[in-house]
Structure formats: C-alpha cells, structure tokens
Amino acid sequence: MAVAARETAAVRRRLVYGLALAAGISLGGIGIARLLGYRLGMHTVVRCRSGHLFETVWIPGIKLRAIDLGIARLQRCPVGAHWSLVVPVRERSLSGEQRAAAARAGRTVL
Ligand SMILES: [Zn+2]
C-alpha cells in the first residue's frame, strides 16, 4: 500500500514537472519570436504558399489541427480553401490594409 502511494506520488510529480517544462518551452518560444518581430499567440498573422494572409492561433508546441514543422505548419488556408505550408508574418512588414484583410479572412483555431 505505501509503495503504491509512493509510486503514484512519483508519477504525479513527473507529470507536473513535464507540464511545467512544456509550458516553459512554449512561453520561451513565444518570447523569442516576439523579439524577432513575430506576434505569436491567439491572433498570429500567417501567409500560405499562395500568398493568402489570415490569422491563426500559433502557440509553440500546441496544435490540434495542423502539422508543426518548427517555423512552418501544414494547415488549412481559409482564404483559398486549400492545405498549405503557412509561416508567421512579421507584423511590421504588413500594411494596415493587409492586417485588416488577414483579420477579415477569419481565424483558424489550432
Ligand atoms: Zn491560401
């Protein structure tokens, strides 16, 4: 009984450490990206291979409906209704009209 309780506590501790490590890596990725001029998070502007701009949720390490390739993702483009590699776009490289168009295009969720 005591051995089982200790093993359960050890499993819980490893789970908590694992989750904390994953959160730290994710937050570190967002911080580095922001330093480079990318605004990763809930309203990240991305460009597909056909040049369409749209917003998506881009949190490093978290994706349910995309294949993460590091700096690019294979994701469904809502503008062209096709699957494509998408990459984040530096906010300051976009005009006001491009930002507005990306927001109008809709936001894909994870
Ligand atoms: Zn597209």
Image (cartoon, rainbow, N blue to C red):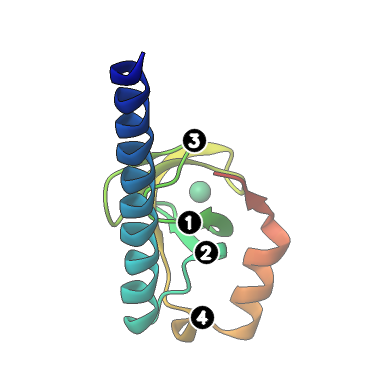
Dot 2 falls on a residue whose secondary structure is: strand
Q: Nearer the viewer, residue 24 or 34?
A: 24
Is residue 109 left or right of 84 when viewed as pictured? right
Mark 3 CB lies closer than 8 A to ligand 1: no
Q: Earlier in the sequence, mark 4 or mark 2?
A: 2
Q: Which residue is mark 1?
A: 58
Residue drawn at (29%, 24%) of the image:
7
Q: Quadrant of the C terminus?
A: top right
Q: Residue furthest front?
A: 2
Residue drawn at (27%, 45%) of the image:
69
Q: Earlier in the sequence, mark 1 or mark 3?
A: 1
Mark 2 vs 1: CB contact within 8 A: yes
Q: Earlier in the sequence, mark 4 or mark 3?
A: 3
Mark 1 CB lies closer than 8 A to ligand 1: no
Q: Earlier in the sequence, mark 4 or mark 1?
A: 1
Name the mark on residue 94: 4
Mark 4 vs 2: CB contact within 8 A: no
Which amino acid type is shown beneath numbered disc 1? Trp
Above or below residue 49? Residue 36 is below
Disc 2 crowd, CA 10 A, few/some/many (<14, 14-19, 20+):
some
Q: Which residue is mark 2?
A: 41
Q: CA distance from mark 4 to mark 3?
A: 27 Å
Q: Nearer the viewer, residue 24 or 45?
A: 24
Which amino acid type is shown beneath numbered disc 4? Leu
Name the mark on residue 64: 3
Q: CA distance from mark 2 to mark 1?
A: 5 Å
Dot 3 falls on a residue whose secondary structure is: loop
